[in-house]
Image (spheres, coloured by chain):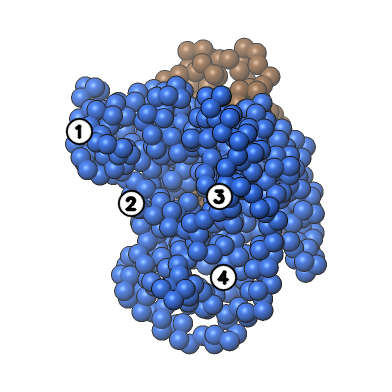
């Protein structure tokens, strides 16, 4: 399963696609079972350059405690920095956040090659 | 310290206004992200995992009190109340909003601070010895030369689009606190037998994916010819650096490909073509800049202090602090005080706004309005009277800033890693925290002695792992965070690149492995050898065996 994510232009906040909107919580993100509708959402995102920066698809999976991004990097994006548990999205707490925090196993590489060029 | 004149101030204000316009055009959709990105990077603004990150230069690691307070203020108003000091004497704010960035740059400009050339393929903030003007070891004040280079390189039209970023470090002491030998150019000031000042010029050192200790291409460059010679080095690089391949674009690759001798020859040839009268700094200008640093109002004090001695005898915590964090000063009755940003369990190099303000207050009252930052991510109060040390120590203790661990195993350098950095493979901060816990017992840490542990979250090596006594590099192994250990590096005057210990370890085994390495060292060390000395004497085998015998 896949989710579309990006950073918001104005403040850099991590956002997720939900039926035409960009939302802040991973738990609210729209799930795509197939690649095509996800790619269509990415294409819409690319046409909104004053709203978000660099939309892309990420893999999510059942992690034992709920759905979570497969890659470690994306879990940290969905939560905030692990060294400051009160900073970022995780500060809100609650079940969905805890599920993400306890997601384990099956982490795979970010799958995003050539990051040095992207930055 | 050097203060900006009207020209400098006008330039900073203009630059900030220009960026405000660029941000407005980006938000209005007149600039695409591809067009805007290079512009924001020229102003130190990155997009990281959770927010924008602003990197502010601290030229030659020197802050006055007003500047330090302003950084605290920015941390509080625009960030989450803290900042991260980096290995290149910059400070990074992790939670910046694009829309706020122009205001922040204005507020920095008000106190002569900026983010210019903290990113991009230009000459970056020059790093210098944080003990400048305070240590008796130095043959000249490196801040003078750093300021010269800062003025010369800022928006230098010829060198604003180099093949790749370009980093210069400068020291004037035999003990190198700048990692000069692993910079694109390292300058080590020396005096001839007849007292003439010159620089050893080291070119083509570097870290990243291909680490090199730079070779010396000139033993004694007359100091007055510095700028023309730098110009010649940069011209050769600008012409022949590998613009075709980002991974081969640093000057180190060019120097290694040509060989140091041939590179030096080309530089000499280029140098010969440059009109020295136009390229080198006029003596009057040098004197003006020098004057700005020559006016530290030291008092004449006795070499010893009864208050200091009495406190040292009475308070073991203070005595420990003195042993580890207090260094000799060139003026009698003064000391250099290192303020550790490596409290056990905290994020290496992070300071809260409150801590920055405490440091600023102490600098104002007790250190002649001078605060420094080190490439090891700590702060320095460079000019503290021996008489004042007990009060300063007590104030630092109250602020959580008195950890007595400078250059000990818990004084770990760590980059932001995957907790913040968009390029990371793995986290660096939690690993540093785990390792530091192992050395939380201060007696144990002191017994182990000098041990420089440095951690990077990816091969870019911002955490200097290649030049660590024990280096830790985060790698991505089938999606899990793994860590490759390496031993025997040094970024100091005895620079060397660390060698890989063996297969990468999972995150939860790293601190344990470091502990094992240290136990091995303690069991084989001779006399007062440092970890590094022992490693150089006995080699890799015993350490490798200790760690991997345990693992299997
Ligand atoms: C968080 C955003 C950062 C980004 C995107 C970033 C990016 C990079 C990259 C791409 C390189 C490799 C350059 C090359 O080999 O050509 C590099 C090297 C380096 N960075 Fe960073 N870095 C970041 C933060 C830091 C921090 C926090 C520090 C200090 C702790 C730092 C200090 C250095 C140093 C010392 C090097 C190695 C020396 C060199 O090859 O220039 N950087 N960085
Ligand atoms: S070493 Fe890698 S992970 Fe660490 S700050 Fe540099 S680019 Fe980021």
As drawn, is B202 to the left or to the right of B404?
left
- Please report the residue visible at 62 percent of the width from the left and 79 percent of the height from the top: B283
Between discs 1 and 2, the one toward the N terminus: 2
Report if the beta carbon of the residue with label 1 is closer than 8 angstroms to ligand 2.
no
As drawn, is B91 to the left or to the right of B485?
right
**Can marks 4 and 1 be said to lie on one chain?**
yes
Between discs 1 and 3, the one toward the N terminus: 3
Find residue B464 and report its image quarter.
Answer: top left
Between discs 2 and 3, the one toward the N terminus: 3
Q: Is residue B214 among the parts visible in the rendering? A: yes
- Disc number lying in front (4 or 1): 1
Colour chain B is painted in: blue
Return the x and y of residue B530 as percentages of the image width and height: 33, 39
Q: Which residue is mark 1?
A: B542
Q: Which residue is mark 4?
A: B159
Q: Residues within 10 Å of mark 1 (few under 14, many from 20)?
A: some
Q: Which residue is mark 3?
A: B329
Return the x and y of residue B181 as percentages of the image width and height: 41, 58
Q: How many marks?
A: 4
Output the chain of dot 1.
Answer: B
Of residues A50 and A47, the one nearer the viewer is: A50
Output the chain of dot 2.
Answer: B
Q: Please, what secondary structure does the residue beneath circle 3 have?
A: loop
**Can marks 1 and 2 be said to lie on one chain?**
yes
Rounded to the nearest whole Å, what is the CA distance between mark 4 and mark 1?
48 Å
Report if the beta carbon of the residue with label 3 is closer than 8 angstroms to ligand 1.
no
Question: Which chain corresponds to the colour brown?
Answer: A
């Amino acid at each position: 399963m896949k989710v579309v994510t990006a950073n918001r232009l104005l403040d850099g906040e991590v956002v997720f696609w939900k039926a035409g909107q960009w939302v802040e919580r991973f738990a609210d993100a729209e799930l795509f079972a197939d690649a095509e509708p996800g790619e269509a959402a990415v294409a819409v995102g690319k046409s909104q350059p004053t709203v978000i920066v660099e939309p892309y698809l990420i893999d999510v999976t059942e992690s034992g405690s709920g759905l979570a991004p497969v890659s470690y990097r994306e879990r940290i994006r969905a939560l905030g920095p692990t060294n400051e548990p009160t900073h970022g999205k995780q500060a809100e707490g609650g079940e969905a956040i805890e599920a993400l925090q306890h997601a384990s196993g099956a982490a795979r590489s970010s799958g995003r090659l050539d990051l040095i060029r992207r930055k | 310290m050097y203060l900006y004149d009207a020209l400098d101030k006008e330039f900073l204000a203009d630059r900030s206004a220009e960026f405000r316009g660029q941000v407005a055009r980006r938000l209005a959709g007149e600039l695409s992200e591809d067009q805007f990105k290079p512009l924001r990077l020229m102003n130190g603004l990155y997009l990281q995992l959770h927010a924008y990150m602003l990197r502010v230069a601290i030229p030659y690691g020197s802050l006055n009190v007003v500047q330090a307070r302003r950084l605290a203020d920015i941390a509080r108003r625009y960030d989450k109340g803290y900042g991260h000091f980096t290995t290149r004497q910059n400070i990074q704010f992790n939670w910046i909003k694009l829309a706020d960035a122009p205001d922040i740059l204005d507020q920095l400009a008000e106190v002569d601070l900026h983010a210019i050339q903290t990113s991009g393929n230009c000459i970056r903030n020059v790093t210098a010895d944080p003990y400048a003007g305070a240590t008796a070891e130095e043959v000249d004040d490196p801040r003078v030369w750093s300021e010269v280079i800062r003025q010369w390189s800022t928006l230098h039209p010829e060198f604003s689009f180099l093949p790749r970023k370009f980093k210069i470090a400068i020291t004037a002491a035999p003990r190198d606190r700048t990692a000069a030998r692993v910079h694109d150019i390292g300058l080590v000031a020396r005096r001839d037998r007849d007292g003439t000042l010159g620089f050893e010029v080291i070119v083509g050192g570097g870290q990243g994916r291909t680490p090199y200790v730079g070779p010396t291409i000139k033993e004694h460059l007359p100091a007055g010819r510095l700028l023309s010679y730098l110009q010649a080095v940069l011209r050769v690089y600008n012409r022949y650096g590998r613009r075709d391949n980002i991974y081969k674009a640093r000057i180190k690759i060019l120097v290694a490909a040509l060989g140091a001798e041939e590179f030096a020859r080309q530089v000499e040839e280029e140098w010969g073509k440059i009109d020295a009268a136009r390229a080198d700094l006029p003596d009057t200008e040098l004197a003006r800049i020098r004057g700005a640093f020559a006016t530290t109002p030291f008092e004449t004090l006795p070499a010893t202090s009864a208050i200091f001695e009495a406190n040292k005898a009475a308070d073991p915590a203070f005595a420990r602090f003195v042993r580890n964090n207090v260094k000799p000063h060139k003026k009698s009755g003064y000391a250099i005080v290192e303020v550790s940003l490596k409290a056990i369990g905290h994020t290496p190099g992070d300071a809260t706004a409150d801590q920055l303000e405490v440091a600023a207050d102490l600098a104002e009252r007790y250190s002649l309005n001078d605060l420094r930052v080190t490439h090891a991510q700590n702060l320095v109060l460079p000019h503290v009277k021996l008489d004042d040390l007990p009060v300063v120590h007590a104030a630092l203790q109250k602020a959580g800033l008195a950890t007595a661990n400078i250059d000990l195993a818990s004084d770990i350098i760590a980059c932001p890693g995957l907790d913040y950095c968009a390029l990371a493979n793995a986290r660096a901060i939690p690993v540093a925290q785990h390792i530091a816990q192992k050395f939380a017992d201060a007696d144990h840490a002191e017994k182990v002695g000098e041990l420089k542990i440095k951690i990077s979250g990816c091969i870019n090596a911002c955490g200097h792992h290649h030049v660590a006594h024990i280096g830790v590099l985060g790698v991505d192994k089938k999606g899990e965070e793994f860590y490759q250990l390496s031993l025997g590096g040094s970024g100091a005057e005895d620079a060397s690149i660390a060698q890989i210990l063996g297969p990468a370890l999972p995150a939860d085994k790293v601190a344990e492995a470091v502990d094992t390495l240290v136990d091995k060292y303690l069991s084989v060390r001779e006399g007062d050898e440092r970890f590094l000395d022992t490693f150089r004497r006995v080699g890799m085998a015993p350490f490798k065996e200790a760690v991997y015998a345990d693992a299997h």
